[in-house]
Amino acid sequence: MSKKNTSMAYKIAKYVLLTFLLVAILSPILVGDRPLICKSESGFSFPFVSEIHLKDHTNKTGWCILPLIPYGPSTMDDAAQQGVKPLYRPEGKSTKFTHWLGTDRLGRDVLAGIVYGTATAFKIGFFSVFLSFLIGVTLGMSAAYFGDDLWRLNLIQWIFGCLVLLISIYYLWYEYLIFSINVFHFIVYFLIIVAGIFVVNRYLFNRTNAKRFAIPLDTLVMKLIEIRKSIPGLFLILSLIVLFPKPSLWNIVIVISLMMWTDFARFARAETLAVKGETYIQSARVLGYDSLRILFIHILPNILPTLLVVICFNISSAIILESSLSFLGIGLPVEEISWGKLLAEGRNMKLWWLVVFPGFAIFLVVLCLNILATHFQNIGPKNNL
């Protein structure tokens, strides 16, 4: 493929993904059976914002602005049950009430489901890759930079760090299982604890003259990667999902993150090893710059082009994995709409439009992400700095 065709494909893919992203962000406004704005004799009301403002939008004394798709993803149309084909219009209703992509066996609008499924897919894709990026890149870069003998801790730091970390994990997990705290809060609390351990060890216990012991960080990270790669993905997914008391979108995010962090760790480690011997890194060390500054200010921007390729591939993999789990009925709550659930229902009911349209959405997003990955792979680091 010529450079011109590649550039054109990249631009098209970029705009298509931007369109999907906007649809995902604006899905509550684009889809719904509740009016956005109503005007009546008493003035303006906003049923979309609050239940208090909910009015009957058939009121003859005023007017209402409905969403672009005037059906909610769970709204059942009694006149369109058992699955109607695309472009079906219920009798006695205007064209704006047309089921453009048909309905499922319960009379739910397929286009509304695809729009909400877009939001679900992008939430899982972006958040899972963001979390795996944080874990994998931090471990990979640290393993390559510090190696097996550069990071040294004294006995007090070892004991304090291990005790506080183990006790914190126990109580956080206990709170999650008993009181069902939000997974996002669980992650935030854990990161705060880790940061606190780091700060205390660095600025309080680091000044003692006790004997220091090297942490074989590189060996530990590589062994963790080997252990993760030795476990089959499907077995790991099923094992991790069982640990969660109830289905949730954030549970899927955590499970996918625990599967994908090794890709970021391997590439971050390899790229860091390639650049840490460069002159500018050695100069930064001689100038006395902090290790964190060298890692995240000098090394990370130079290895980011390679990581962008991994990000694009992993987002597409996360979307495919989520759709596969939803197709099998694993992980997500019953009320959560996703592309995989639409595909599963289309297979069970033999409704071709429930297979073609969600399948095409998955294909289009994954194709565009792969085109973006190819573009980032072809351009060199010099063009990105």
Image (cartoon, rainbow, N blue to C red):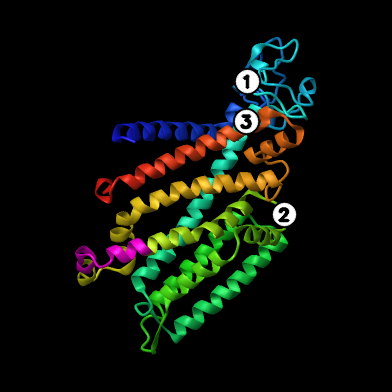
Image-based side of 270 in relation to 367, left or right = left
Magenta span? 270-283
Packing grade of label 3 (10 A; few <14, some 14-19, many >=20) is few
Q: Amino acid at mark 1?
A: Leu
Disc nearer the start of the sequence (3/1): 1
Q: Say which quadrant the N terminus sits in.
A: top left
The quarter holding residue 40 reads: top right
Q: Position of residue 54 (x, y in %)?
A: 69, 25
Question: Which residue matches tag 2?
Answer: 246
Question: Which residue matches tag 1?
Answer: 66
Image-based side of 179 in relation to 217, left or right = right
Discs 3, 1 touching: Cβ within 8 Å: no
Q: Position of residue 96 (x, y in %)?
A: 64, 15
Disc nearer the start of the sequence (1/2): 1
Q: Position of residue 146 (x, y in %)?
A: 35, 73
Packing grade of label 1 (10 A; few <14, some 14-19, many >=20) is many
Front in this rendered view, residue 310 or 121: 310
Numbered tag placed on residue 356 in the rendering: 3
As drawn, 25 above or below 303 = above
The quarter holding residue 346 reads: top right
Packing grade of label 2 (10 A; few <14, some 14-19, many >=20) is few
Label 3, label 2: how many angstroms apart (C-alpha)? 31 Å
Q: Amino acid at mark 3?
A: Val
